[in-house]
Image (tube, rainbow, N blue to C red):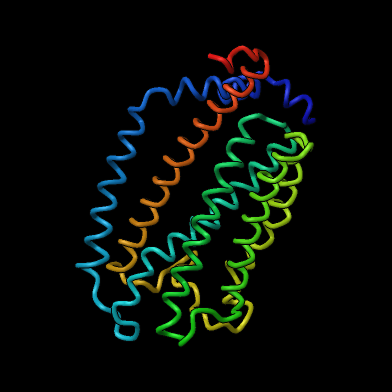
Amino acid sequence: MEIKEWRNSTQLTRFHELLKPTNYLQITSNFGWLRLLILFISVLSLSGFLLATMITCTDNQQGENYRIIYIHVPSAWMAMLLYLLLAINSIIFLLYRHPMSTFIIDSLSKTGIIYTGITLFTGSLWAFPMWGTFWVWDARLTSVLILFFLYLVHKIILISSQHTQMNIEKRYKIASIVSIIGFINLPIIKYSVDWWSTLHQGSSITQYQTQMHLTVLTPLLITFSLFLLITVVMTLYDMRQKIIRNTIRSNRLRDPSINHI
């Protein structure tokens, strides 16, 4: 089926109607979902903290320093997951120019910078007691640093072009192309410890098995779930605020008298 035919299909029309900015505002106007997510976040925070600090044993080689894994690893997972979602939404924007894609791209780009920055910072703190230095040009570390710069360049394109004559569609098109090209860095991050000889430890969790003890793996997955829920709340709220600001700006352009109210 051709893209044009798919665009005009009933299913796609309904999907586009559901994802209209105005409909999104109506759906998210009831903050019952937010209270529920905050409740889950509170429960996960408490259980993850108790498991990570009181139940898990001290590592024989790394001592207490290894507990930073419960921030470092979930942050790295989130940084990669968000970039994957960013690339997917960039493809959707290039194909269909859906207005919601721009709001999603904005939110994912900003949150991705935060998680990648946390990954690099906690990784340096973790590395110093083990390697005697905060940074080495290791394949895994370098590829994650490249991911951080990809996020940064993507966000700079979106921000800087707001102060130029470049129209919205063009700047999002350029940013989308950058994110899609940068997608090739994700498998490099994942398999860098297998393809090259690195100081960074290998993958503890593979497709078929895990080398982690259950007492370590459980709080790690809980913390990842916590970060995931926090990101969902942040993204939904950020998108809502962006849509509201965009609506106000559009109304002011159509009716300048609103500026004097």
Q: Where is residue 44 in the image (x, y as percent from the top left)?
A: 29, 50
In the displayed structure, would residue 115 be above or below residue 40?
Answer: below
Q: Can residue 102 be seen in this view?
A: yes
Q: Give the quadrant of the N terminus.
A: top right
Q: Position of residue 67 (x, y in %)?
A: 32, 71
Task: Identify the residue shown where x is 62% and y is 69%.
Answer: 143
Task: Identify the residue shown where x is 65% and y is 48%.
Answer: 87
In the displayed structure, would residue 220 be above or below residue 227?
Answer: below
Horizontal side of residue 51 vs 13, given as left or right? left
Give the camera-side residue of 105 and 199: 105
Task: Identify the residue shown where x is 29% and y is 77%.
Answer: 64
Give the camera-side residue of 196 and 101: 101
Q: Position of residue 183 (x, y in %)?
A: 67, 56
Horizontal side of residue 184 vs 234, given as left or right? right
Give the camera-side residue of 18 and 117: 117
Horizontal side of residue 186 vs 50, given as left or right? right
Question: Which quadrant holds residue 195?
Answer: bottom right
Give the camera-side residue of 210 and 237: 237
Task: Identify the residue shown where x is 24% and y is 70%.
Answer: 56
Q: Residue furthest front?
A: 260
Q: Is residue 172 visible?
A: no
In the displayed structure, would residue 57 be above or below residue 256?
Answer: below
Q: Position of residue 74 (x, y in %)?
A: 43, 60
Looking at the rendered structure, the number of numbered marks drawn on it comes to: 0
